[in-house]
């Protein structure tokens, strides 16, 4: 239960920080919560923003291509803005770029859902 809550918290923070991916942490959260706190897991699956994607993962074990593009665009735009406008040391900028690359690698390595009607 503790790991599920921790992953859920990191996933929510990742939704607002460009270098921290959201998807892997939410998937881990549902993995742990399904086994330790099924009621909270059901609630997470019905959240307005993330619920659809988590249900699709459970049903199809993948992510839609448009979700990957949207996540990549937002991550690159915010990461580049942070590096360009951040005024931080070169090593911190390299760290941001490296973490961004890892996050994008994780997102694009997930299986892609094809030709399945979207459920709300």
Image (cartoon, rainbow, N blue to C red):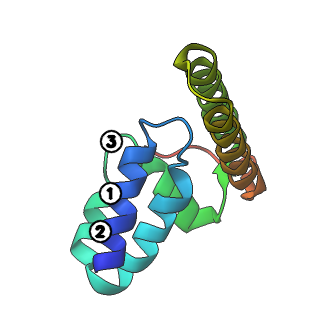
Of the pair 106 and 59, the residue shown nearer to us: 106
Residue drawn at the location 48% of the way across and 61% of the way down:
25
Q: Is residue 72 left or right of residue 88?
A: right
Give the quadrant of the C terminus: top left
Q: Residue furthest left?
A: 39
Q: Is residue 5 left or right of residue 31?
A: left
Q: Is residue 41 left or right of residue 88?
A: left
Q: Which mark is residue 48?
A: 3
Question: In front of the other: label 3 or label 1?
Answer: 1
**Label 3, residues with CA under 10 Å away: few <14, some 14-19, many ≥20:** few
Whether residue 95 can be seen here: yes
Q: Which mark is residue 9?
A: 1
**Label 1, residues with CA under 10 Å away: few <14, some 14-19, many ≥20:** some
The answer to whether 2 is drawn above or below residue 49 in the figure is below
Residue 104 screen position, x and y as percent: 71, 44
Whether residue 45 can be seen here: no
Separation of residues labelled 3 and 1 (CA atoms): 16 Å
Of the pair 4 and 39, the residue shown nearer to us: 4
Tag 1's secondary structure?
helix
Q: Are marks 1 and 2 in contact (CB under 8 Å)?
A: yes
Separation of residues labelled 1 and 2 (CA atoms): 6 Å
Q: Which mark is residue 98?
A: none
Please give the residue where the numbered disc 2 appears in the rendered image. 5
Give the quadrant of the N terminus: bottom left
Separation of residues labelled 2 and 3 (CA atoms): 18 Å
Residue drawn at the location 56% of the way across and 18% of the way down:
87
Q: Is residue 21 left or right of residue 16?
A: right
Of the pair 14 and 32, the residue shown nearer to us: 14
Q: Residue furthest top?
A: 85
Sequence-first tag of 3 and 1: 1
């Amino acid at each position: 239960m503790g790991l599920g809550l921790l992953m859920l918290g990191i996933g929510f923070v990742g939704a607002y920080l460009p270098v921290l991916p959201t998807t892997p942490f939410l998937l881990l959260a549902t993995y742990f919560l399904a086994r330790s706190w099924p009621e909270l897991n059901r609630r997470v699956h019905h959240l307005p923003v993330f619920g659809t994607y988590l249900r699709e993962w459970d049903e199809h074990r993948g992510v839609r291509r448009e979700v990957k593009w949207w996540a990549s665009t937002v991550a690159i735009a915010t990461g580049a803005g942070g590096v360009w406008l951040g005024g931080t040391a070169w090593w911190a900028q390299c760290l941001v770029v490296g973490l961004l690359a890892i996050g994008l690698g994780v997102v694009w390595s997930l299986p892609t859902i094809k030709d399945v009607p979207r459920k709300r």
